[in-house]
Image (cartoon, grey):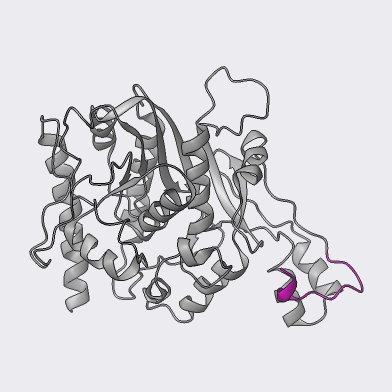
Amino acid sequence: MREINAMLLEKYYFTTFLLALLTTTTTSFTLFPPSPLSSTRRFTRLSASPDILLIGPSILQLVVAKHISQTTDMNPLIVAPQKTLDSYVKLVNDKSGEILKDALIGLPDLTDSNKGTFKGVVFTSEEPVISGPVMKQIMEWEGFADGFKVVICGPISTFVNKEKKANWMPILNNDGKEEQAWRTFTEAARGVDFGRGEGCFVRHGSLMGGGVDGDDQLEELGLDEGVYKMSLEQYRDLRERAFDRYRLGGQVLSGDSLNPKPEDQAQKEKEVIKQGEDREAFCATGGYPEIDRTNRHTLASAVCHILKNGVKGDFSVGKGEGRAEKEVTVLSKAVTKIPTSEDWAPMFDSPGPAVWPTPMEGVTYSKSEA
């Protein structure tokens, strides 16, 4: 019952957030109210000169924050409800304390020193809580520099694999209302005016992973082990770990897209690879594509690339710039390392689904070769 009350209280925060933002007329405002269940701790404001706003809350918000701080010269500023910030302390896996030290429950107060200095904003919520008017209000904030980057993350509209969310609970089912809320969110994301900035709507599949159980590079980029244990779904933690171990590669597709499995793919695999364990290894190696699922690390890496390289204009021509289209889908594939900027550039230049591999006779497939 305590968990249910906490979830309902979080919904209250979201509603209050929207109302507070839409009724404010000042240059600074509180997006989320202080939590009546939180401690009295507050984070230092802007001590590290952050320049990228991250609007949450979500697990993805933390993963994106860590990727920005570790792989770019930009500094993230997390904006989330105080209760969520309190819970982040256990998940962030940040010995330096840098990620959360400037976190706020609202946009920063504008001063002569920070006005026009923010390079971008990323909307990272895994719930459909941000409306069009809220996006518009944030786009008009005077803290942004001219040409600031906007990345709006949201799910694809159609799924083949019906994955449950990381915080899934069996006694609460609002799937119908949530689908409508995401449709409203999508309309807002596609219609928002970026003003002085440039923006990209980044679609993603069902989000998985985000922890440290994988390649050595995840030690600095991943969240605490607790991120694998947030769902009551049976065996979910094993599947989340498998994504971090084997599915860090990326695909970039135009618009709102899937990478559907060819109709004869499963039959080919069964005919050539007789043992179930070997087929499982085949699907976890060699760039085997995901149909509609995305590792949070993969998505966070793509977001960093867009923040650094920008978005294609209406009249962009040619290749080689590595800039994103105005709406793309990022999915994962079976590679054990996160894509680098050199890997992302051709994917954004020429979006398209990863090729489905053909199983070969006489080849031994092993996950250790991934």
Q: x, y percentage for residue 248?
A: 59, 60
Magenta stretch, residue numbers: 359-370
Quarter of the picture containing the N terminus is: bottom left
- For the view shown, which residue lies furthest in the right direction? 362
Residue situated in front as seen by the camera: 207 or 180: 207
Residue 325 in the figure: left or right of residue 27: right
Q: Does residue 183 belong to the magenta stretch?
A: no
Up the image or down, 164 lies above or below 153; here it is: below
Residue 280 in the figure: left or right of residue 31: right
Residue 131 figure quarter: top left
Q: Is residue 333 visible?
A: yes
Residue 352 in the figure: left or right of residue 80: right
How many marks do you count on the picture?
Answer: 0
Q: At x 58% / y 45%, what residue is drawn?
A: 257
- For the view shown, which residue lies furthest in the top direction? 315
Q: At x 74% / y 58%, what residue is drawn?
A: 263
Quarter of the picture containing the C terminus is: bottom right
Q: x, y percentage for residue 136?
A: 27, 30
Up the image or down, 356 lies above or below 115; here it is: below
Q: x, y percentage for residue 360?
A: 88, 67
Q: Is residue 209 visible?
A: no
Residue 205 in the figure: left or right of residue 335: left
Classified by dominant secondary structure, the portion drawn in magenta counts as loop
Up the image or down, 200 lies above or below 280; here it is: above
Q: At x 64% / y 20%, what residue is drawn?
A: 317
